[in-house]
C-alpha cells in the first residue's frame, strides 16, 4: 500500500511541475509543447549626411520604439562612404540598406520629383506634401525607384525657398540687374538671366563666406537653413514670396525591403507614414513659428514681391517651367502632362 501511495505522489509532482512550466510553451501539432517563437529582428544600415543626422536619429528612434524593437537601424555618416553618387550605388547593390538625400542631389537619376522645383506653383510645405503623395500614390515615384533597384521608404518636406539679400530689396524688376544670386533650381535660371541677374551654384556650406566677401549678393535658401548658417548676420532683407518647394527622400535597397516578412513590412510602412505626417507639422511649426522669428529678431526684414514683379515677371515663367517639366518627363518615357496634372490637382484641392 505504501508503494502505491509513493507512486501516486510522484506522478502528482511530475504533472504539477509540467503545469508550472507551461506558460512559455506553445502546443505543437502532435500534442507536445514547444517554446513560443520569437519575433525576428531586422537590422539595416542607413547612410545620412552629417547635417541631417539629428533629424534621422529621431527617425531611427521612432522606428525602433514603434516596431517594438523588430526594426533596428544603425546610422552612418555619408563621409564614411564617399560622394552621394557612391552612396547611391552602395544602396543599389545592397552594401547599404537605406540612404537619405534630396531629389535635387540626383539630377538625371530621380527626375519625376523635380516638379517641386517649378517656380511659383507651391504656396507652402503642405502644397508640396500633397503633391508628393499624390504622385507617389499614382505610382510614378515607385516606378522610377524600381528601375534603380530601390524602394521609396519615406519622404520629408523642406521649407519653402526664398531669396535673402545683403543690402538691396528685390521688390522691382530693375533691382535684379547685376545681382549675383546663389541658385539651385534650373527652372529659375532663365528668370534671373532675363532680369539681368547672374545665377550661380554654390554649396550651402560656402554661402556665408561668399556673401561676406561679395562673391554673391543674394542666396536662395529656406528660413531654417538661413538660421542654421546665420544669414541674419549678413543679409538685411528676405523676399518672403515662396519661389519653390522641395523634399528629401529615404531610399531603401529593394531586396532589403522585401527581406522583411509581410507583417513587418506593413508595420514599417505604417510607421513611415506616421513619421511623414509628424515631420510636415514640425516643418511648418519650425518655418513659421521659429525660423522666421529668429531671422527677424536678428534684424532681417521680410517683404512680399510687388505686383509688378509677380504679374509682369514671375507669373509669366510659371507656364514655361511647367512646359519644361512636361517635355523632360516625355523625353524620359513618362506621360509628363499626366504627372503635372496630378501635381496641380493636389495643390488646387486646397
Image: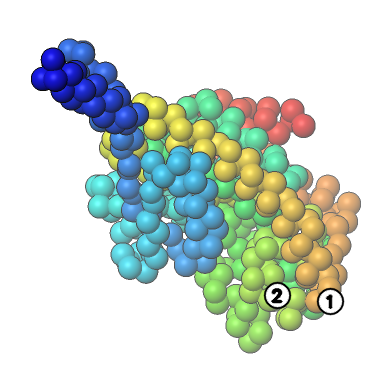
The residue under the point 78% across, 70% down is 295
Res. 267 mark: none
Q: Residues within 10 Å of mark 2 (few under 14, many from 20)?
A: many
As drawn, 205 above or below 49: below
Q: Quadrant location of residue 176?
A: bottom right
Residue drawn at 51 percent across, 33 percent down? 270
Question: Measured from the top left, where is residue 178 in percent x and y?
Answer: 70, 73
In percent of the image, x 38 and y 38: which residue is there? 151
Against 83, is 258 above or below? above
Is residue 114 visible in the rendered structure shown here? no
Residue 147 position, x and y percent, is 33, 36
Residue 344 placed where, x, y %? Answer: 67, 31
Mark 1 vs mark 2: which is more N-terminal?
2
* Residue plotted at (64% across, 44% down): 278
Residue 143 as seen in the image, left or right of residue 3: right
Discs 1, 2 touching: Cβ within 8 Å: no
Q: Is residue 193 left or right of residue 20?
A: right
Q: Quadrant of the C terminus?
A: top right
Seen in the picture, residue 313 relative to 176 is either above or below; the reply is above
Q: Residue furthest bottom?
A: 213
The quadrant the N terminus occupies is top left
Q: Residue furthest left?
A: 3
Give SS at disc 1: loop
Q: Is residue 75 left or right of residue 13?
A: right
Q: Nearer the viewer, residue 195 or 260?
A: 260
Left or right placement of residue 13 versus residue 7 in this view: right
Q: Which residue is mark 1?
A: 299
Q: Can the viewer see residue 239?
A: yes
Q: Which residue is mark 2?
A: 231
Amino acid at each position: 500500500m505504501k508503494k502505491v501511495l509513493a507512486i501516486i505522489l510522484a506522478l502528482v509532482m511530475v504533472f504539477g511541475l509540467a503545469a508550472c512550466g507551461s506558460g512559455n510553451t506553445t502546443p505543437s501539432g502532435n500534442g507536445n509543447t514547444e517554446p513560443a517563437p520569437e519575433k525576428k529582428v531586422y537590422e539595416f544600415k542607413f547612410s545620412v549626411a552629417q547635417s541631417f543626422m539629428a533629424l534621422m536619429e529621431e527617425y531611427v528612434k521612432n522606428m525602433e520604439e514603434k516596431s517594438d524593437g523588430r526594426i533596428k537601424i544603425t546610422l552612418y555618416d555619408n563621409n564614411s562612404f564617399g560622394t552621394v553618387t557612391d552612396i547611391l550605388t552602395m544602396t543599389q547593390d545592397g552594401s547599404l540598406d537605406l540612404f537619405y538625400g534630396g531629389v535635387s542631389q540626383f539630377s538625371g537619376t530621380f527626375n519625376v520629383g523635380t516638379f517641386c522645383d517649378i517656380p511659383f506653383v507651391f504656396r507652402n510645405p503642405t502644397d508640396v506634401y500633397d503633391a508628393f503623395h499624390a504622385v507617389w500614390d499614382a505610382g510614378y515615384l515607385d516606378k522610377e525607384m524600381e528601375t534603380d533597384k530601390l524602394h521609396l521608404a519615406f519622404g520629408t518636406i523642406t521649407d519653402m525657398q526664398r531669396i535673402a539679400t545683403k543690402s538691396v530689396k528685390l521688390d522691382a524688376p530693375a533691382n535684379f540687374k547685376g545681382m549675383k544670386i546663389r541658385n539651385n533650381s534650373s527652372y529659375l535660371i532663365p528668370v534671373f538671366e532675363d532680369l539681368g541677374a547672374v545665377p550661380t551654384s554654390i554649396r550651402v556650406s560656402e554661402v556665408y563666406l561668399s556673401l561676406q566677401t561679395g562673391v554673391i549678393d543674394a542666396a536662395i535658401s529656406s528660413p531654417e537653413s538661413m538660421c542654421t548658417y546665420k544669414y541674419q548676420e549678413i543679409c538685411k532683407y528676405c523676399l518672403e514670396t515662396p519661389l519653390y518647394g522641395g523634399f528629401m527622400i529615404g531610399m531603401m535597397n529593394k531586396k532589403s525591403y522585401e527581406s522583411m516578412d509581410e507583417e513587418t513590412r506593413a508595420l514599417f510602412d505604417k510607421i513611415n507614414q506616421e513619421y511623414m505626417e509628424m515631420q510636415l507639422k514640425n516643418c511648418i511649426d519650425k518655418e513659421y513659428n521659429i525660423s522666421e522669428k529668429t531671422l527677424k529678431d536678428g534684424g532681417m526684414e521680410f517683404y512680399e514681391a510687388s505686383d509688378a514683379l509677380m504679374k509682369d515677371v514671375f507669373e509669366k515663367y510659371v507656364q514655361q517651367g511647367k512646359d519644361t517639366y512636361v517635355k523632360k518627363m516625355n523625353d524620359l518615357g513618362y506621360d509628363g502632362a499626366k504627372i503635372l496634372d496630378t501635381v496641380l490637382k493636389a495643390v488646387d484641392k486646397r
